Image (spheres, rainbow, N blue to C red):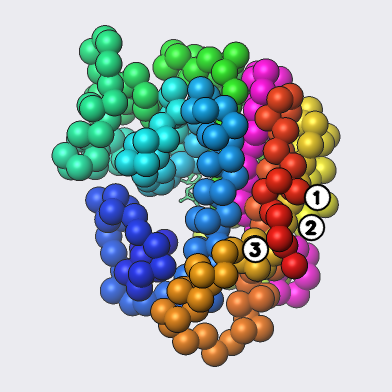
Amino acid sequence: KTGSINVGYWKDPYLDYFVRLPKERKAPEISRGYYARVQGVGRLLKAFLQKTECNCQIINLGAGMDTLFWKLKDENLLPIKYFEVDFPSIVTRKIHNIKSKPPLSKPIMESHSGESLLMDAHSLDSSRYAIVGADLRELPKLEEKLKKCNMDPDLPTLLLAECVLIYMTQDHSANLLKWVAGMFQAAMFINYEQVNMSDRFGQIMVENLQSRKCSLVGVDDCRSLDSQKERFLQNGWETANAIDMMKAYNCLPKDDVRRIEALEFLDEKELLEQLMQHYCLCWATKDSSNLGEDMLWQGSP
Ligand SMILES: C[S@@+](CC[C@H](N)C(=O)[O-])C[C@H]1O[C@@H](n2cnc3c(N)ncnc32)[C@H](O)[C@@H]1O
């Protein structure tokens, strides 16, 4: 994301504290893809926050160095509690950055109230923000750790997974989706990741990622928009929607598109389209969090 921020696609004053800025520019089609992703996820997320009036919790699964907590704090849109989950080694690195950089630690302190804040090398639990070191494939331990940080099954809950489920086997991600559907009264799940991976372009993407030692054990669920929806409907979710990122891009406000398209010249429109057709935004709901496609993607071409 950092390369695209440098060129001015969008602002994220916090990412810099976690990730070293790359010297080289990203290809414009990649930056436009990132832009559509950030805007698309943001649109679903804000609809959920608005609908629940922020009386909800967010659980960011496989959050990595994501900075959403700080951006929501700046926009006065913090949920009752925001959780992040990732492997303990990633969590330790993230906490080290938070502890050593006041622009990251201050907002956590400011939003904290009540008992003393827990922050050591491996865990962080404040009243509004917690980072949990856990493996998403080990559900009993995950549940125990989240509950210890006051996760509330009765609160409307938004689960977010960006480029995470593809790294888990079909069985492991199905178990995770089933666990979430069974755990919360009202929930929405936003999943952003690859799609259409069985066509020629998709196969090349898989080969490229595998050559970088990324093991895509969940790629079978990324065959099509239908397979992305099915995994939710088969695991306890009531509604599921999926759009490819070309559709998300085409639904961006015209002024936004004019602005970002003026930032860099794009030679290969076809490559942009192919790339965008191989990532998708999928959202599933259960109970009252019924956010249909019509409401969120009005004006689509
Ligand atoms: C490609 S990164 C995406 C990070 C972040 N969601 C983003 O979009 O910037 C995938 C993340 O998922 C985490 N992850 C993958 N499998 C996991 C598992 N079984 N348990 C916990 N975290 C996992 C990785 O450690 C990594 O941080």
Write the residue at 34% across / 19% down.
Answer: 127
Q: Nearer the viewer, residue 245 or 86?
A: 245
User: Helix, strand, or loop for circle 1?
Assistant: helix
Write the residue at 80% across / 31% down.
Answer: 238
Tell me if residue 14 is in the magenta stretch. Answer: no
Residue corresponding to mark 3: 251
Q: Report how far apart the C-alphas of labels 2 and 3 lie in the structure.
A: 20 Å
- Looking at the image, is mark 3 or mark 1 earlier in the sequence? 1
Residue range in magenta is 175-202
Q: Report how far apart the C-alphas of labels 3 and 1 lie in the structure.
A: 23 Å
**Three-letter code, disc 3:** Cys
Could you tell me which quadrant the C terminus lies in? bottom right
Horizontally, residue 44 falls left or right of residue 145, namely: right
For the residues carrying marks 2 and 3, which lies nearer the camera in this image? 3
Q: How many marks?
A: 3
Q: Are discs 3 and 1 less than 8 Å apart at CB?
A: no
- Tag 1: Cα neighbours inside 10 Å, few (<14), some, or many (≥20)? some
